[in-house]
């Protein structure tokens, strides 16, 4: 039977309108950010350092004052409300556990601050620890736990008082890859069980793709694009999103019409564009993902292929279940091809090849 899903009405909707934060002269750290986050949604703020994602998160938490704009949590304006009154849980990259307290005492701290009776406090603490699979660790101290266990204690402390919104600022950034992946799975389960709204900040694209209902891609203080992981990966709206979210081969050129067919004319060649294409004379960017590319040692004309780049395999990167080939073209352009580990075993460094793809897989961007 499928696992039951929590009632997402337990989360609070978050509404941002025209948020601006300026530090000194120059471009604002956050520049007119507007966003509607549904109750119970898991949304990730993704972007490079300095893009505005953490500043926006801190504005929602109330840790910084904004210069303009409105913030609503559950339909209530909170711009003038102090952080502890917003009923928001927060988890940071650095766990900030109290070293002199036991695990249970750390988790109970927010309940003590809210004057929850001792019996109810003990019940909630145990339930929170069991949710993060640390039910038997209540009497230990933080220095007796691994990094991953400490982070789970921090999560338990953030949800023990039943907030409607949980903010997470790169919480797994200091952990090794295997542990990070384990905690990502646990966090997805926790979100499913609790049904609260989670706003997650990261610069790790894979983490964002794994965790999120939607992703907001931040760039230079603004949101460049927002959508589901599949929407952003398959249909990025601009060059920045395409390059930041996954690997991409991007060709810059001009649309031409050849024998009634629209093509992209660029230094690397002429490639058939998917319909509907831009008007002739339009300058565009076109992208094809490495996993949509194929390698063939055959002449494209003989193989009946429509789009092809001639080149030489410059590097082969083994990635376990897949491998990546870097192909250098006569125009000195390097094109990336990704395939299963068992494919193209007759191709290696130094092989003369053609890189091909289907026209439908060439995405036109602004």
Image (spheres, grey):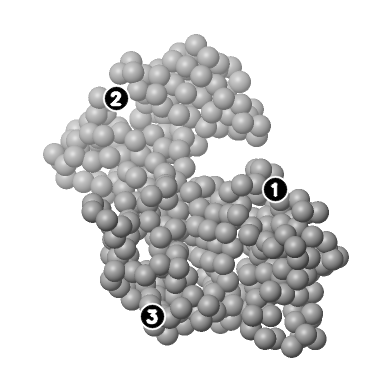
Other residues around mark 3 within 10 Å, as few (<14) / some (14–19) / many (≥20): few
Position of residue 22 measured from the top left corner of the image (x, y, whole percent)? 29, 60
Number of numbered discs overlaid on the protein picture: 3
Q: Viewer-proximal residue, 84 or 331? A: 84
Tell me the quarter of the picture where residue 255 sits.
top left
Tag 1's secondary structure? Answer: helix
Where residue 306 sits, quadrant-wise, is top left
- Given the current orientation, which residue lies at the most extreme bottom position? 117
Residue 349 numbered mark, or none: none
Residue 308: tell me if it is visible: yes
124 to 313, vertically: above or below: below
In three-dimensional space, the C-alpha distance between marks 3 and 2, rounded to whole angstroms, equals 56 Å
Residue situated furthest front in the rendering: 100
- Front tag of 2 and 1: 1
Q: Residues under labels 2 and 1: Cα distance?
A: 42 Å
Quick check: 22 above or below 123? above
Q: Residue 80 has which mark?
A: 3
- Percent position of residue 7, x then y: 61, 80
The residue singled out by tag 2 in the image is 268
Residue at the spot 32% in from the left edge and 60% down from the top edge: 30
User: Residue 331: x percent and y percent?
Assistant: 30, 18
Is 102 left or right of 247, judged from the image as shown? right
Mark positioned earlier in the residue sequence (3 or 2): 3
> Taking the image as drawn, is residue 299 in sight?
no
Circle 1 residues within 10 Å: few <14, some 14–19, many ≥20: few
Mark 1–mark 3 Cα distance, whole angstroms, equals 39 Å
> Percent x, y for residue 355?
42, 25
Q: Nearer the viewer, residue 15 or 277?
A: 15
Q: Do the numbered discs 1 and 3 sit on residues whose CB atoms are within 8 Å?
A: no
Query: Is label 1 or label 3 in front?
Result: 3
Mark 1 = which residue?
Answer: 179
């Amino acid at each position: 039977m499928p696992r039951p899903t929590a009632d997402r009405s337990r989360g609070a909707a978050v509404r941002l309108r025209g948020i601006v934060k300026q530090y000194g002269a120059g471009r604002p750290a956050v520049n007119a950010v507007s966003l509607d986050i549904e109750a119970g949604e898991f949304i990730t703020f993704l972007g490079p350092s300095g893009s505005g994602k953490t500043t926006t998160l801190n504005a929602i938490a109330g840790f910084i004052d904004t210069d303009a704009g409105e913030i609503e949590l559950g339909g209530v304006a909170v711009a003038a409300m102090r952080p502890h009154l917003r009923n928001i849980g927060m988890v940071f990259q650095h766990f900030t556990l109290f070293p002199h307290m036991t695990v249970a005492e750390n988790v109970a701290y927010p309940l003590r601050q809210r004057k929850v009776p001792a019996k109810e406090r003990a019940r909630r603490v145990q339930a929170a620890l069991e949710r993060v699979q640390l039910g038997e660790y209540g009497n230990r101290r933080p220095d007796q736990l691994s990094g991953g266990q400490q982070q789970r204690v921090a999560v338990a402390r953030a949800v023990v008082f039943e907030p409607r919104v949980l903010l997470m600022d790169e919480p797994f950034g200091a952990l090794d890859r295997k542990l990070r992946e384990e905690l990502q799975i646990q966090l997805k389960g926790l979100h499913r069980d609790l049904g609260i709204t989670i706003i997650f900040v990261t610069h790790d694209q894979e983490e964002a793709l794994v965790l999120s209902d939607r992703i907001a891609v931040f760039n230079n203080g603004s949101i460049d694009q927002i959508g589901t992981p599949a929407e952003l990966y398959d249909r990025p709206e601009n060059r920045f999103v395409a390059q930041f979210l996954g690997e991409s081969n991007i060709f810059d050129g001009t649309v031409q019409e050849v024998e009634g067919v629209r093509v992209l004319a660029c230094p690397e060649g002429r490639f058939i564009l998917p319909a509907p294409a831009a008007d002739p004379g339009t300058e565009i960017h076109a992208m094809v993902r490495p996993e949509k590319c194929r390698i063939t040692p055959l002449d494209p004309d003989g193989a009946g292929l429509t789009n092809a780049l001639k080149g030489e395999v410059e590097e082969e990167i083994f990635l376990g279940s897949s491998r990546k080939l870097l192909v250098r073209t006569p125009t000195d352009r390097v094109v990336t091809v990704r395939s299963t580990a068992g494919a193209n075993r007759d191709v290696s460094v130094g092989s003369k090849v053609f890189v091909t793809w289907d026209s439908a897989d060439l995405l036109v961007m602004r």
